[in-house]
Image (tube, rainbow, N blue to C red):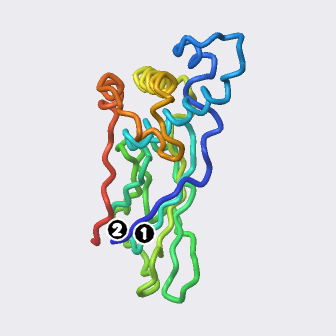
Amino acid sequence: MKADWVQTIAPIQEPITLTDVKLHCRALADVADEDPVIAMYAKGARLWAEHYTSRAFFTQTYRLEQDDFTREIWLPRAAPLQSVTSVKYYDTDGVQQTLATTYYRVDTTSEPGRVVLKPGQSWPSVQCERGQAVEVIYVAGWSTVQAIPDDIRVGICWMADHLYEHRSGIEVGAGITAVEVPMGIASFLSPYKVYWREPVCA
């Protein structure tokens, strides 16, 4: 079954501050000339770490679309899952409806989080042969920067430092995949890797 997801609201704060990154990179704290590029590397390091772990670190919103309902709807990057804003679907007449919460429960304990059909309930029928008939809007990530595990924050710092030190090896447009990632960085993040389950027809 086809499923697509996209981030609709980005985090408003990074897990590590510019000051912290500059200290880690041994850049002069009172020199602002390189602040924009250091901040760019810090953001790039965070994006890489989120992709590597399949997590959202700080509060951000996603939209998942899949062709039909499944008994369990696993939510990409929803580790941790804060909340589900809505579950919508296109009914048999092609009209989008918001599903009442009496049909499902939100599992914020599993990683990633998921939407699960409640006992005794059944999903409504969706419009026949309509792609992306089901839509889930949800909020993922830790609600405070302080709640993000220190291992993850250290891994981001190390990655930002690695990018800063090897900037000459990064080709324009190639992104951080042009730089080999040291094993030490991955070791900080590996314990936090989660695996999204693709939707399977019930």
Q: Residues within 10 Å of mark 2 (few under 14, many from 20)?
A: some
Q: Tell me the residue at 64%/10% (across/down).
A: 28
Circle 1 SS class: strand
Q: Which residue is label 1 attached to?
A: 66
Which residue is nearer to you in this view: 185 or 188? 185
Residue 97 screen position, x and y as percent: 57, 75
Residue 45 screen position, x and y as percent: 49, 33
Q: Tell me the residue at 42%/43% (across/down).
A: 51
Image: 30 above or below 66: above
Which amino acid does the dot numbered 1 rest on?
Gln
Residue 83 screen position, x and y as percent: 52, 48
Judge whether residue 153 can be spotted in this image. Answer: no
Circle 2 SS class: loop
Which amino acid does the dot numbered 2 rest on?
Thr
Q: Which residue is label 2 attached to?
A: 70
Q: Is residue 111 left or right of residue 97?
A: left
Q: CA distance from mark 1 to mark 2?
A: 9 Å
Judge whether residue 187 can be spotted in this image. Answer: yes
Q: Is residue 36 left or right of residue 42?
A: right
Which residue is nearer to you in this view: 173 or 6? 173
Q: Tell me the residue at 45%/78% (across/down).
A: 131
Residue 189 screen position, x and y as percent: 35, 29
Q: Tell me the residue at 56%/24% (across/down).
A: 16
Which residue is nearer to you in this view: 60 or 39? 39
